[in-house]
Image (spheres, rainbow, N blue to C red):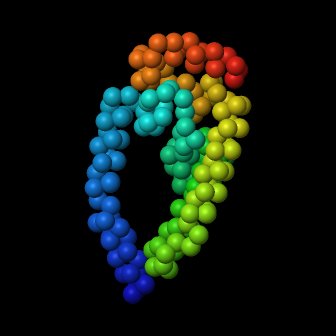
């Protein structure tokens, strides 16, 4: 029981420390969804999906036990989930500094970028979540952007 109290206390401390970050994220989430219908800043600005596109949907599939669906949406969910569990274990259960955080994070990012590159090559622009978002900010503001993207999309196809 004492260990559970310590875990809850550590979680509470982090919530208090990062309260404003949560508020800012919530405001961004609501604003981005209201204005653009999507959350990803790269997608909003460029129309091109990022390495994390589909990660939230994949995480929910994983949580609900839909492992195959999670892998189809974004297989990066598996190393990302491992990383979060690893960090949570050290931070909240052990109450210690997360060991080798930077190195493991670098490996995670590298793995995600490799998966992203392979999937963009294979699926862009036709298969979710690797589709072009036409209502992006650059399309209407940079002359020739739409034509350049169209050429890139044909090159991928």
Instruction: Residue at 67% x, 30% y: name it.
Output: 123
**Residue at 54% of width from left, 43% of height from top?**
52
- Is residue 121 shown left or right of residue 89? right
Residue 17 placement (x, y as % from top left): 31, 65
Q: Whole-percent x and y of residue 27?
A: 29, 43
Query: Between residues 19 and 61, which one lies in front from this camera angle?
Result: 19
**Residue 35 seen in render:** yes
Residue in the image at 58% along x and 55% along y: 80
Q: Nearer the viewer, residue 77 or 152?
A: 152
The C terminus appears in which quarter of the rendering?
Answer: top right
The correct choice, above or below, for 13 with respect to 53 in the image is below
Q: In the figure, residue 20 lies in which quadrant?
A: bottom left
Which residue lies most toward the front here? 143
Q: Is residue 85 visible?
A: no
Which quadrant of the rendered structure holds the N terminus? Answer: bottom left
How many callouts does the rendering have? 0
| Horizontal and vertical percent position of residue 14 | 35, 67
What residue do we see at 56% from left, 73% from top?
99
Q: In the image, is 76 to the left or to the right of 87?
A: right
Looking at the picture, does residue 17 appear above or below residue 10?
above
> Residue 96 versus residue 84: which sits nearer the camera?
96
């Amino acid at each position: 029981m004492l260990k559970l109290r310590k875990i809850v206390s550590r979680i509470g401390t982090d919530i208090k420390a990062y309260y404003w970050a949560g508020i800012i994220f919530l405001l961004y989430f609501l604003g981005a969804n209201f204005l653009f219908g999507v959350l990803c800043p790269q997608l909003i600005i460029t129309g091109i999906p990022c390495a994390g596109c589909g990660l939230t949907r994949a995480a929910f599939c994983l949580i609900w036990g839909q492992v195959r669906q999670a892998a189809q949406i974004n297989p990066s969910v598996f190393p990302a989930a491992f990383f979060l569990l690893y960090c949570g274990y050290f931070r909240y259960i052990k109450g210690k500094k997360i060991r080798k955080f930077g190195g493991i994070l670098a490996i995670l990012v590298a793995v995600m970028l490799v998966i992203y590159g392979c999937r963009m090559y294979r699926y862009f622009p036709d298969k979710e979540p690797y589709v072009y978002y036409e209502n992006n900010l650059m399309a209407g503001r940079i002359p020739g952007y739409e034509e350049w993207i169209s050429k890139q999309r044909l090159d991928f196809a």
